[in-house]
């Protein structure tokens, strides 16, 4: 984040100064401008800025009309907010394990479940920046009349194909969300998020919900939230959005270089291969590799830490095993792939400014342990 800031510092400070000098620091024209630019970038009709990605999920589900006891399918191998938005709306999370190659929700298992249970919404997560299979998702949507809320918090700019048309993640379903948490591919310098949709009614509802359910100040049509996007963040995001394509291309180049080095050294690691497609199926928000077992993973992590290389675990405890969801009766062994990945994967450094010599050092250090 700091290397990136060095390059855009001047523009950012100027934009922040302008917002404060203008005096409109919550919503207002700066937020409207960013919403318009975001909608254009994504090729979607409506973008609604909110306070963070977690709120974006809660508001989106609320806008979809979820009622107490409604069942919603999602993955247990994701960030907590993907599932907490379900319980915060009174719904029941129905977890489905992930595909061992993509780490995204296993849509074949989703199909089996849809045959047996009445499900209102599916929340697919484009995990680590990799797009979920749109074709299969569309098949399920049509066949089972289920709504889709895309959790695109990690995948801004990633694409999928449907009927030969390329769409950006977040824009395929009924409604989609993004997080602009500082470390995201498009990150603010604080919390921020957005909801996107092509459905005018859903957009209007989401817009009201972010402001205590009101269109007109002090008149409330429903009980909503205080979840507005700050103008300073919107101004910063407008600047950064201009660089997103360049930064995403860099991330893909870095993923390619990791791949080349792993191949050259023939390391026993499973890594996300850069696919040769005519659309961008992965934007490498995280570069997550998998080791043979937990002991090896932990040894690599320790060795990298000792050498000053930062890594992270996504996610050490799958969501079905979180104490706060105990009432839903899940137990260890229910989702073996997610449980295994929580013990065997490690996120390696990836950010657009990462240099080739640094990647070489990281791979060299990993090879010393394997
Ligand atoms: C998959 C996923 N969903 C939702 C969120 C929530 O976003 P935020 O941190 O902006 O609330 C995140 C952020 O980490 C995420 O990674």
Image (spheres, rainbow, N blue to C red):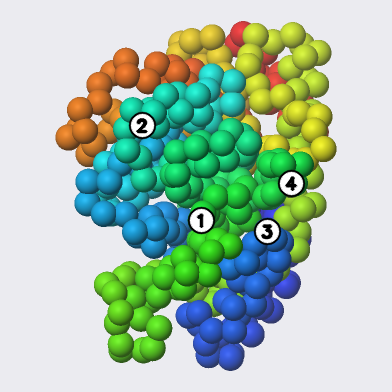
| 275 on left or right of 101 | right
Point out the tag, 3 or 4, that comes first from the N-terminus. Answer: 3
Q: Secondary structure at mark 1?
A: strand
Q: Secondary structure at mark 4?
A: strand
Q: What residue is pinned by disc 2? A: 95
| 355 on left or right of 156 | right
Point out the tag, 2 or 4, that comes first from the N-terminus. Answer: 2
Name above or below for residue 164 compared with residue 263.
below
Give the CA separation, mark 2 to mark 4: 28 Å
Asked if disc 2 and disc 1 are in contact, CB closer than 8 Å, the reply is no
Classify the position of the C terminus by image quarter.
Answer: top right
| 213 on left or right of 68 | right
Q: Residue at x 54, y 9 (%)?
A: 292
Q: What residue is pinned by disc 4? A: 166
Point out the tag, 2 or 1, that comes first from the N-terminus. Answer: 2
Asked if disc 2 and disc 4 are in contact, CB closer than 8 Å, the reply is no
In the rendered image, residue 199, in percent from the top left (x then y), is placed at 53, 64
Q: Residue at x 62, y 39 (%)?
A: 134
Give the CA separation, mark 2 to mark 1: 20 Å
**In front: mark 3 or mark 4?**
4
Q: What residue is pinned by disc 1? A: 175
Give whichever of 196, 234 is nearer the camera: 196
| 275 on left or right of 330 | right
In the rendered image, residue 187, in percent from the top left (x then y), is placed at 59, 57
Q: How many marks?
A: 4
Q: Quadrant of residue 215?
A: bottom left
**In front: mark 2 or mark 4?**
4
Q: What residue is pinned by disc 3? A: 42
């Amino acid at each position: 984040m700091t290397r990136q800031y060095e390059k855009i510092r001047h523009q950012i400070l100027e934009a922040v100064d302008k917002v404060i000098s203008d005096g409109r620091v919550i919503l207002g024209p700066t937020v409207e401008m960013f919403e318009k630019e975001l909608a254009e970038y994504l090729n979607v009709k409506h973008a609604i800025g909110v306070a963070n990605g977690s709120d974006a999920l809660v508001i989106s589900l609320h806008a979809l009309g979820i009622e107490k006891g409604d069942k919603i399918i999602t993955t247990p191998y994701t960030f907590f907010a993907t599932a907490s938005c379900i319980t915060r709306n009174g719904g029941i999370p129905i977890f489905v394990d992930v595909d061992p190659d993509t780490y995204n929700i296993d849509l074949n298992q989703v199909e089996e479940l849809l045959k047996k249970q009445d499900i209102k919404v599916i929340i697919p997560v484009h995990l680590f920046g990799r797009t979920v299979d749109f074709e299969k998702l569309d098949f399920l949507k049509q066949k089972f009349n289920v709504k889709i809320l895309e959790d695109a918090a990690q995948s801004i700019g990633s694409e999928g194909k449907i009927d030969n048309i390329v769409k950006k993640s977040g824009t395929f379903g009924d409604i989609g969300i993004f997080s602009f948490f500082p470390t995201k591919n498009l990150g603010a310098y604080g919390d921020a998020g957005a909801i996107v949709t092509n459905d005018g009614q859903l957009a209007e509802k989401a817009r009201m919900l972010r402001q205590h359910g009101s269109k007109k100040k002090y008149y409330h049509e429903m009980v909503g939230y205080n979840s507005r996007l700050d103008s300073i963040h919107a101004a910063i995001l407008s600047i950064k959005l201009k660089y997103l394509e360049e930064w995403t291309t860099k991330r893909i180049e870095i993923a390619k270089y990791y791949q080349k080095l792993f191949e050259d050294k023939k390391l026993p690691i499973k890594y996300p291969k850069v696919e040769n497609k005519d659309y961008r199926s992965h934007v490498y928000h995280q570069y997550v590799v998998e080791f043979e077992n937990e002991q090896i993973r932990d040894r690599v992590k320790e060795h990298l830490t000792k050498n000053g290389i930062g890594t992270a675990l996504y996610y050490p405890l799958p969501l079905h095993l979180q104490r706060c969801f105990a009432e839903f009766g899940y137990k260890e062994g229910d989702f073996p792939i997610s449980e295994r990945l929580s013990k065997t994967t490690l996120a390696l450094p990836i950010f657009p400014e990462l240099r080739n010599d640094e990647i070489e050092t990281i791979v060299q250090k990993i090879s010393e342990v394997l």
